[in-house]
Amino acid sequence: MIELLINKFKGYVCVELKGNTPERFFNLANARGIHIWDIRKVDDSSSFYVSVKDVYRLKSITKKTKMKIRIRERYGLPFFLFCNRKRKMLFMGLLTGWVIVYVMSLYVWNISFEGNRAHTDDELTKFVERLGIKEGIKQSSIEPEEIEKAIRNEFFDITWASVEVSGTMLRIHVRENSNYKLDNELEDDEEQPGDIISTRNATVMSIVTRSGTPLVKEGELVKVGDKLIDGKYTLYGDDLSVIAEHFVKADGDIVGKVIYDINETIAREYEHKCYTGNEYIVKNIGYDSRQCELVLPWEVKKYKLYDTITTGERIKLGDDFYLPVYIGETVYKEYEVKQEKYTDEELEKLANEKIEYILKKLEKNTIQILDNSVKIENGGEYCKISGQITVLEYIGSFGGTYE
Amino acid sequence: MRKFIDALELPKDLCLGALNVKLTGQYEAYIENYRSIIEYGDSIIKLQGKNSRLSISGKNLKIVCFTKDDMKIKGYLQEVKFY
């Protein structure tokens, strides 16, 4: 294979040999170190392949053996260049293409992150952008050690970072310490004293205090933001004088009865998008993420209403060699808006679905649904969903902290 | 001399310059230690060794490549004969 490539690069010819003593010819060529291959007998002549360089050396042997040689075919790069010597633009194009690809390969066109779980790609991308690392940066200006150091300093839970330039791709590998955040949060929580406040307008049904001073009793009405358990813990003496004040992190479970008012309407009439089936596809090419259409969509101007769906893919050579060129297509789909009306059954189904959705949302925090008096009123142009849902739920949340 | 080489189990192609022929089925022959080509045709190839001659006959024979010491022949081989 390698030999074939070398021969193709240097050029070789197929030679036809005529005469009475081909054996002597081959023996002499062999003795002089001329590399000949693929010898075949065709009728009364022989044909073989020999490199361009050795063709001239065969002359003396042909004279000696009184044989005649004729070049039948020419192969390889030198002959290709000679045949296409007048096609200057072809070579210019090839050269320009090569130069463009070479210049592009000096820049970074894609940044990827690996090993990150707690930190999203967006978060890390924004951080490296602040360091000046973004798509289109010169590879020579990247200092991997500096980036690694900056990432480790910015994100304390990232214990290891490695920056690697592969092709036109900048790969940033990170390793996170998943226990770090938990430990840290626990420490923070234990240290910070504060109150528990109400998150709902509710009636307190039960209160269990684990730390702090309870401020409300069962049956009391509370509003959003009301203090339920105080983080201040006061010690009184026998004469009711304050001996000491401790600040703790208030903790406890407060269950409240919360009433949710439900008031929704669904219009009978609705707009329905109908695709007419007319669509127009335009091929796109673009630099970076800006795409431009190759053909102006004159046809599209005839459409009154249309959806535009643009898809694009970045060109890459191999796995890692990304180029800042996007190729894709834009599909223009024509549609019409039709006014339609729901039937009574459809409206009822929609209303039931809505109620189910509301209940599902409530179930996340709720301990128990006590009462559900939501009713569906179907008739006329609207369908009304109204009523109240009474639930028991935890209403306390850790709120204000003491400085 | 031959007895001596036999007794010492020395390789004969090196000590005696004997032809070394390796056949791959009927399709390929690899010959080492040849001296020159005596006859070449698409149905017969005759080679000169140091002490013997080799004749390979068959159909559509072609010399794929050859150097001063070895040669590779392809085609449909029918007979390999020393004479």
Image (tube, rainbow, N blue to C red):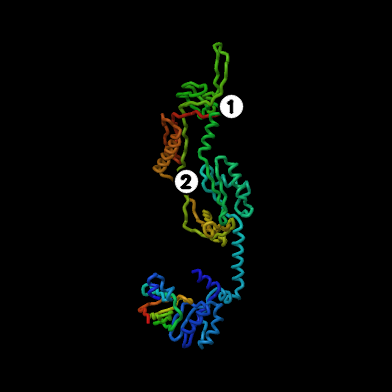
Q: Is residue A345 left or right of residue A308?
A: left
Count the marks: how many? 2
Q: Nearer the viewer, residue B34 or A194?
A: B34
- Which amino acid lies under the numbered mark 2 shown in the image of this protein? Tyr
For mark 1, give the secondary structure.
Answer: loop
Q: Is residue A340 visible?
A: yes
Q: Is residue A79 left or right of residue A253?
A: right
To which residue does mark 2 refer?
Answer: A270
Residue depicted at 42% across the width and 38% down the height: A356
Quadrant of residue B37 within the rendered picture: bottom left
- Which amino acid lies under the numbered mark 1 shown in the image of this protein? Tyr
To which residue does mark 1 refer?
Answer: A402
Q: Is residue A116 left or right of residue B78?
A: right
For mark 2, give the secondary structure.
Answer: strand
Q: Does residue A277 sit above or below A80 in this rendering?
A: above
Specify the farthest residue to the top: A239
Q: Nearer the viewer, residue A308 or A91?
A: A91
